[in-house]
Image (cartoon, rainbow, N blue to C red):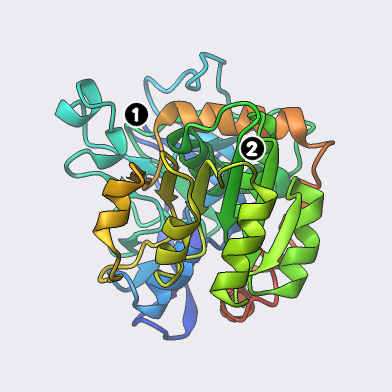
Amino acid sequence: MRVPELGRVAVYETPGGPFRIESHALRPPLPGEALVKVRMSTICRSDIHSWQGHRPNPCPGLLGHEIVGDIVALGESVTHDMRGDPLAPGDRVTWSEYFIPGANYFTEVLDLPQKSPGVDKYGHMAVTTAPHHHGGFGEYCYILPRSWILRLPPDLSDEEATPINCGVATMIAIIEAAALRIGQTVVIQGLGLLGLYGAAIAKARGARWVIGLDIDPARRERAACFGVDCALDAAADPSALLAEIATQCRPVGPDAVIEVCGAVKAIPLGIDMLRIGGTYVLGGVVNPRSLIEIDANLLLKKMLTLRGVHNYRPRNLVEALDFVVANRRRYPFRELVDGKYALDRVGDAMADAVAQRVLRAAIVP
């Protein structure tokens, strides 16, 4: 494929500001890079938080990191994906939401590449930063060196594939951190896309009983299609909630509680409902200064494990793809991307996502 001269991107100048369409030059990919024509990019909650100014993001900003696209050109040394499958122009791919500057102590020793010094994320850079096309809200995106690329199977729809490199891979990492075993019980706080995938993954890992908590009745109703055995109103009286969960998670309460609602006020309740020796995993409180007061004595007396998960390891990306492929007929993943918008309607897509009129809005350039 020929590399075009220009590509359009949707950019915002200041937090909360309107989006405008700009054109920036394209060039052939450098060694270690690939150039992709974007097919779809879905709006993650972190995109919303960045645009709203709740988390630091340079401006003029180019968002979008849940991306699927077709390879236009490959730079030198980019020949195979992370599984070893050959890559060629025209292949439909996804890739890690982040890239790292090179090998370091975090990657080589600590197995935490997502925490490498100098790590950066797609859709988290100013559009003025070369090569300009490094977010999903545009016609093209460069896959930069030290990313992890996966070729996608042809029978997987874009709607099923696009959330894999963020929402699904992150939930794979969160369920792993919860150390769920066959026959255990889990409570998931928040039934957005992350929570629904989390329920499905927990069931695939052998969870006996999955309880979902959310304030939105429509989300609670949808949850049954994704492995949630019982969906409860998160705004109900806390004492009643604790009693109901204890009854359903006999004999001693939930083995694990997972927070993906982004509400810090949910954390003390999650700690209260855990059984002795249980595990609490934080995955949704991504905004700085998310302060909460907890009774630390409960962590000690109940011998709890408290873990945080931010992003994921590269192997979780492979596991996420394999999970979706294996379970796409068991769960209606395609329905979770329920709003599609052209590039010049990014503002409308963001407004609908903020107001939760859609579960996952998709930009389709």
- Residue 4 showing in the rendered view: no
Quarter occupied by residue 91: top right
173 vs 60, left or right, is: right
Pointer 1 residue: 32
Residue 170 horizontal side relative to residue 162, left or right: left
In the image, what residue type sits under mark 1?
Answer: Gly
- Report, in whole angstroms, how far the alpha carbon at label 1 lies from the one at label 2: 33 Å
Kindly identify the residue that appears in the image at 27 percent across and 37 percent down: 100
The numbered dot on residue 355 is: none
Q: Position of residue 345 (x, y in %)?
A: 63, 76
Q: Nearer the viewer, residue 335 or 283?
A: 283
- Give the percent coordinates (x, y) of residue 329: 84, 36
Residue sitting at x 17%, y 41%: 117
Q: Secondary structure at mark 2?
A: helix
Residue type for callout 2: Ile
Q: Residue at x 63, y 38 (%)?
A: 202
**Foreground of the two, 301 or 194:** 301
Please give the residue where the numbered disc 2 appears in the rendered image: 201
Q: Position of residue 355 (x, y in %)?
A: 61, 81
Task: State which mark lies toward you, 1 or 2.
Answer: 2
Image check: 183 left or right of 77?
right
Position of residue 353 measured from the top left corner of the image (x, y, whole percent) = 60, 73
Specify whether 105 is left or right of 178: left
